[in-house]
Image: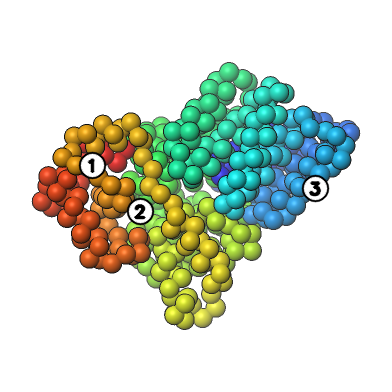
Amino acid sequence: MENGCGLEPGGGPPTERGPGGSGVGLSGSYIRGGGGGGISGILAATFGLARVGKFQGKLRQAHRTIQNGLQLAADRGEEKLIVLGKLHTMLGSILYEWNELDAATGHLNTSIGIGQEMQDGSVLIGAHGNLSFVKQTRGDPIAASNLMEQALQILEKVNLDEAIATLLEPARARLWLAQGRLEEAVVWAEGSGLSAEDRLEEYHAFISVLIAQGKLDDAISLLDGVQLFAERTGLGGGAPVELLVLQAAVSDAKGEMPQAERILERALAIGEPEGLIRTFEPAAAMLPKILEAHEQGHRAESPGSSLEYLSELVAVFKEIPVHHSSTALERAQQQLREPLTDRELEVLRLIASGMSNRRIAEALIVSVGTIKAHAHNIYGKLDVRSRSQAIARTRDLNLLH
């Protein structure tokens, strides 16, 4: 199981290969972390143990392991070991998953400082990549893109193992999707050439692109294969939560709501004990409906997650703003008789995705009448008379990319 952008300095997760692959063992982490003796060896073993726990979905256990390692280093007066940069990066990615963005930023910046002083490219790439997602979540896509670009530039300058190199491209694709840059993500997906030996993180990004393209049958087919592999190998305690969330999102997009809700309930039951939050973003639009059913007593007889957990998730994703590439958006807005507001852009994006007024209203937790009013204003500003004309005009102006 991976969180954030899935970049861990020192290589991918301990059982990182996709269907049919072998993976990197704990000993590899130990050696890369600084050898077998002294404080460096102890912390390297700590990093390897935490990495195993994190990939198995045991975030709280991994968090405790990392904290113990950092405390040990502090007690010994150690501050500038490469393995400390790795531990801070992993801790930052866990805190990001828990939506503790200030704490995540602090640890990732500490990792960058260690990486710069020790001139370690692996630490720098992992920290920059993870921090890019924190910046994106905080509504700063420009800073997010700059950080990801810095990670790629570092990768070009240093000689690193294949693991982190192959994780960086799918991480960038996921960032592009978060920014609404579908065309660039599609280019990556079409040229990725995924095979049975590839990592789950690459499949996650590829499936996300298929969903964004509306290629739902293809997404389901690939999800089935990846989930079967995950369940057979025990990755993340069975089918990783991320894959369940993607499967729920696909079922929702196909209008198969009962199935989508059952799948998401299963993911929620697995996610709550470990406090997962960011993982549920692909299915965020479904959460208010499940919460409402819970409050009204209409959920499954034995729901696996609590009202408090659902309420927290709904509150987190309700606050997420819609972000755009400012330069492209400004150019497009200049061609309109009056600029679209952020809310109108949000509604327009959902219209362009093919959602009905009713489904848009459910996703944004407003009335259908409010959505119709927004649509009327959008049509006026675009100088069109219908949904199809609005979508065509949006594409012509490149408003949503």
Of badges 2 and 1, nearer the viewer stands 1
**Which residue was labeled with disc 3?**
68
Give x and y (percent) for residue 94.
Answer: 63, 48
For label 2, the residue is 217
Spatial separation of the CA atoms under disc 3 and disc 2: 45 Å
Which numbered disc flags the more N-terminal residue, 1 or 3? 3
Residue 96 screen position, x and y as percent? 58, 47
Q: Is residue 134 above or below residue 366?
A: above
Left or right: where does residue 232 sit relative to residue 40? left
> For the residue labelled by badge 1, is the local secondary structure a helix, a strand or a loop?
loop
Q: Amino acid at mark 1?
A: Pro
For label 1, the residue is: 339
- For image coordinates 71% across by 23% down, the residue present is 117
1 or 3: mark nearer the eye: 1
Residue 319: image x %, image y %? 44, 55
C-alpha separation, residue under disc 1 versus residue under disc 3: 52 Å
Mark 3 vs mark 2, foreground winner is 3
Q: Position of residue 323 (x, y in %)?
A: 38, 43
Q: Is residue 65 left or right of residue 98?
A: right
Disc 3 marks which amino acid?
Asn
Question: Which residue lies at the image location 57% right of the left edge and 42% below the top edge?
Answer: 6
